[in-house]
Image: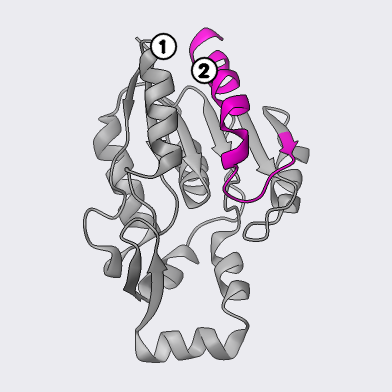
Amino acid sequence: MTRIIYLHGFASSPASSKASYFRDYLENAGVRVDVPDLTSGDFEHLTITGQLAVIEEVAGGESVSLIGSSLGGYLAALYAARHPEVGRLVLLAPAFAFARLWGSSLGGAEQVETWRRTGTMEVFHYGENRNCRLGYQLLADAGRYEDYPDFSQPALIFHGLHDDAVPVSSSREFSAGHPNATLEVLDSDHQLLNMLDYMAPKTARFLIES
C-alpha cells in the first residue's frame, strides 16, 4: 500500500488548509497519509536537523512518498537525498536555498546580525494565528545544508508564477539540472490555493498510479 507523508510549511501546522485538502483527497483514494507536526510543539527552537529527525521517525525506515509545501518541500528534497527508500516526491513551491532565502527576506546583513546577537525574533505563526518567538538556531543550522539537494527519485514540482515568497526561478534552476524532476509553473502565488483542484488529481496519479 502506498504511504505518503505530507510536510507542512514554515510557521504552519498539520491543520493547514492545504495539508487537510491533500490528506482528504488522497485518503479518499485509499492511501494512508501522515501529516506530522514538524516543530514537535517547540517552534522557538526549530531547526532543519530537528525537522528531518521528525520525518525519519514518522517514516520509520519504510518506503514512503513525500509531499512538501514551501519549507516542507525543501525538507522533502533533503530527506530524499539522504534516504533512497523514498519513492516519489511532490513539491509545492519548495523553499530551495532556504538559508540564503531567509537571509535576504530579513532585509540584509544588519537584520541577520541583530537576530544572531539577540538570539530570537518575533514571527507570525499562521498555524497559531499569533506572533511567536523563533531562535537564531534555525538560520545557523540551515547553513549546514545544501541549497539544492541532489536526490534522484522522480519528482513533480508545482510553483506559482507570482510567488513573492519563494522565487519560481529556484524551482526552474533545480529542474534544469535534474531530469528526474518535472516542473509545472502555475498561474498562482506562493500558497497555490487556487490550484488545489488541479494539483490534487495530478498528485494522486503521480504518487499512486505510477
Tell me how the rendering is colored.
one colour
Query: What residue type is disc 2 on?
Result: Ala
Which one is in front, 78 or 105? 105
Q: Looking at the image, do the residues carrying marks 1 and 2 touch, with CB atoms under 8 Å apart?
A: yes
Image location (x, y in percent) of residue 144: 47, 63
Residue 153 can be seen in this image: no
Chief SS of the magenta region: helix
Which one is in front, 192 or 50? 192
Q: Residue at x 43, y 21 (%)?
A: 25
Are there few (<14), some (14-19), or many (20+) residues within 10 Å of tag 1?
A: few
Q: Residue at x 31, y 49 (%)?
A: 38
Image location (x, y in percent) of residue 11: 39, 59
Q: Is residue 136 left or right of residue 95?
A: left
The image shows residue 38, relative to residue 82, as above or below, that is below
Q: Is residue 3 left or right of residue 72?
A: left
Element type at mark 2: helix
Element type at mark 1: loop
Query: What residue type is disc 1 on?
Result: Ala
Image location (x, y in percent) of residue 97: 60, 58
The image shows residue 49, relative to residue 180, as above or below, that is below
Could you tell me how far apart the alpha carbons at marks 1 and 2 are, in whole angstroms? 8 Å
Query: What are the residue bounds of the magenta stretch?
Result: 184-210
Residue 190 within the magenta-colored segment of the rendering = yes
Q: Residue at x 58, y 26 (%)?
A: 197
Q: Which residue is mark 1?
A: 29
Which one is in front, 123 or 49? 123
Marking on residue 204:
2
Quadrant containing the C terminus is: top right
Q: Is residue 121 left or right of residue 159?
A: left
Specify the quadrant of the image occupied by residue 35. top left
